[in-house]
Amino acid sequence: MTTSFAWFVRGNFLASFYVQPMGFVLAVMAAMTFWAALYVAITGKPAYLLLSFVPRRYTLLPLLLFGAAAWGWKIFIHLHGIDGWNGWRR
């Protein structure tokens, strides 16, 4: 996941998604959290108003399933020796 975050902050979103898809999703969520926190800090509005836009009922299970699939992808690319961003060109 740390490699995925490192690629994400450098702007290489494809590499971030390739090395760990769930890491990419978490990096996107962290970036969204930063901007939401900045909005709350500037406006002084409570954070729960922003959270009311997130449909929790429909996000938890898909995120859990995507996380399991992402680790399956990571295991697959590791077992085939294509893990790491440069490994896909072999």
Image: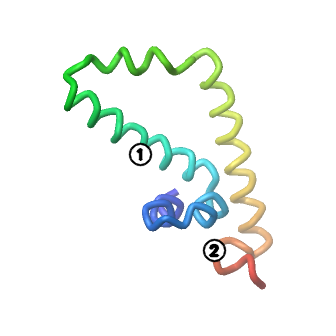
Name the N-terminal-most of marks 2 and 1: 1
Which three-letter amino acid code belongs to the residue tagged 2? Trp
Determine whether the residue tagged by mark 1 lies in a helix, strand or loop.
Answer: helix
Residue at left offset 42%, top offset 20%: 51
Coordinates of residue 72 in the picture (x, y in percent): 74, 51
Q: Give percent across and percent down for residue 38.
A: 27, 37
In terms of secondary structure, where does tag 2 sit? helix
Quarter of image, res 86: bottom right
Q: Looking at the image, which residue is at 26% across and 27% down?
A: 40
The residue to which callout 1 is attached is 31
Identity of the residue drawn at 43% across and 39% down = 32
Q: Residue furthest bottom?
A: 90
Mark 2 — residue?
A: 85
Amino acid bearing label 1: Ala
Identify which residue is drawn at 57% across, 17% down.
55
The quadrant of the image that shows the C terminus is: bottom right
